[in-house]
Amino acid sequence: MKNSQEVFESHMKAVDTLEPSKVMDDYTDDAIFITPEKTYKGKQVIFNFYKKFLPNFDGFQFKTIKQEAHDNVVYFVWSGKNTHLDIQLATDTYIIDNGKIKQHTFAAINN
């Protein structure tokens, strides 16, 4: 079973592929994903979010500000941009359960 850091690394590699199905491999079936706009419950609903969201990350250059894993929690602060997005500051928190993302929060300031 993957530890929290390994789940995070797998998730980031999946995001880089821009393929929602690969991103979803790291989530539990009953995962919850909370954003400022909406709370997404369940793997299929989160998949639909990524299906719309991931194309915006084509050519995106992430800059990691801080990333830590402690027990079952991963904290990630980042920025970056491409032709579609200019994210000044973003944060993700992942709660890992049995090698999968059980809960995930996300917020960003987009210029």
Image (tube, rainbow, N blue to C red):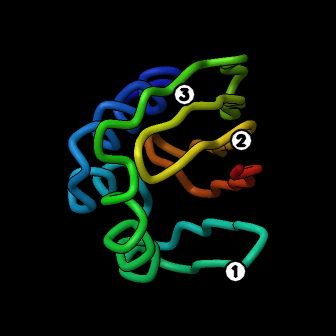
The residue labelled by disc 3 is: 4
- In the rendered image, the vertical position of residue 64 relative to residue 45, given as above or below: above
- Residue at left offset 66%, top offset 45%: 95
Whether residue 43 sits left or right of residue 102 in the image: it is left
Q: Amino acid at mark 1?
A: Lys
Q: In which image quadrant can residue 27 be found?
A: bottom left
- Mark 2 and mark 1 lie on one chain; the one further toward the N terminus is 1
Residue 22: x and y, percent?
Answer: 22, 51
The residue labelled by disc 2 is: 90
- Mark 1 and mark 3 lie on one chain; the one further toward the N terminus is 3
Label 1: element kind: loop
Instruction: Say whether marks 3 and 2 touch (CB < 8 Å).
Output: no
- Residue at left offset 29%, top offset 46%: 58
The residue labelled by disc 1 is: 38
Q: Amino acid at mark 3?
A: Ser
Residue placed furthest toward the front: 83
Q: In which image quadrant can residue 104 be found?
A: bottom right
